[in-house]
Amino acid sequence: MKHYYIIKMTVFLVSFSSIVLNILESIYVLVFNRPVFVHVYIVKKKLSKRQKEFLENNVIFYKNLDNKYKSYYEHRVAKFIRNYQFIERDGFNLTFEAKVLIASSYVKLTFGMRKYLTATFSKIIIYPTSYYSLITKQYHKGEFNPALKIIIFSWEDFLLGEMVLNDNLNLGIHEFTHALTFHGKQSKDVSARIFYRTYIELLNFMKNTNNSKKVFQSGYFRDYAKTNALEFVSVIMEHFFETPEDLKQKFPELYYKIEYMLNYRNILTR
């Protein structure tokens, strides 16, 4: 009987402590707009030597990190590859390089978030080039389908987005941003809440006629940004990663909102 009460008291104390910590972190988030911690791993996953060398030689974002953050990045890339199913279509040859590059695109976007994996998609389908959609009856370069929990890429266009770093066209960042927006709306995780709350702030910013007129008449963002709110935020995200200084100079309000949205302040070495 004594052991029963000890166990019961222990469970109560753990539950109570968890509630208190959640309340304290909620207050911290309201004040500082970021989670208390991001990178805490009991055991870090490792990439193979070839995978690490590929990251070092082909992903500038990773190359610019210090060794501590590189180990975090590698862990997240490895977890991503193990967590999601990669599916080849129309003769596409899925190599380890393709897996690492796709995973890296997502990890780069979520590197400031504590809970970075999402259940909004479970499969990644890769075509060699643009593909015909039976749903829209059009050719696509990529898409996110929340109902089917899939992300689809044209490898040709995905790779072009990773190779050309100053044209503000990045298919991986664009589609993964869609998935994170849905994740933010559904998840109670602190990083997801910050992401979605800032997404709403961006929409409210654009509801102001003067702001929207200034943004769209500038010609800075491509016309596709005018499609809807989801596309607008994904296009801004492409600018944030490809030409951050230009975005910061031309539209500092948008730049800083994205920075908070992703918890990038003091997280990265650019």
Image (cartoon, grey):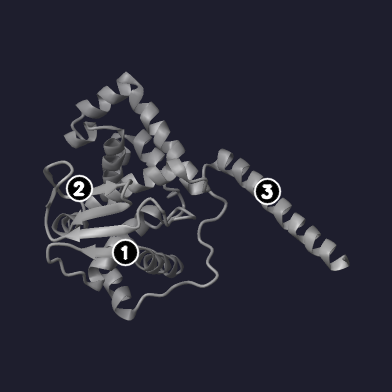
| Residue 252: quarter of image | top left
Q: Residue at x 42, y 68 (%)?
A: 75
Residue 130 point in image, percent of width and height:
12, 53
Residue 145 point in image, percent of width and height:
28, 47
Reading the image, the residue beneath label 3 is: 19
Choose mark 2 or mark 1, whichever is in front: 1
Q: Is residue 173 above or below residue 204?
A: below
Task: Please state which of residues 187 and 68 is positioned toward the viewer in this rendering.
Answer: 187
Label 2 crowd (10 A; few <14 / some 14-19 / many >=20): many
Choose mark 1 or mark 3, whichever is in front: 1
Quadrant location of the C terminus in the rendered image: bottom left
Reading the image, the residue beneath label 2 is: 169
In the image, what residue type sits under mark 1? Gln
Q: Is residue 179 above or below residue 75?
A: above
Residue 185 point in image, percent of width and height:
44, 40
Choose mark 2 or mark 3, whichever is in front: 3
Give the left or right position of residue 115, taking residue 110 as reference: right
Q: Secondary structure at mark 2?
A: loop
Q: Residue at x 35, y 21 (%)?
A: 208
Q: Residue at x 49, y 55 (%)?
A: 114
Q: CA distance from mark 1 to mark 3?
A: 35 Å
Label 3 crowd (10 A; few <14 / some 14-19 / many >=20): few
In the image, what residue type sits under mark 2? Leu
Disc number at residue 188? none
Task: Please state which of residues 78 and 6 is positioned toward the viewer in this rendering.
Answer: 6
In the image, what residue type sits under mark 3? Ile
In the rendered image, is residue 260 in sight? no
Label 1 crowd (10 A; few <14 / some 14-19 / many >=20): few
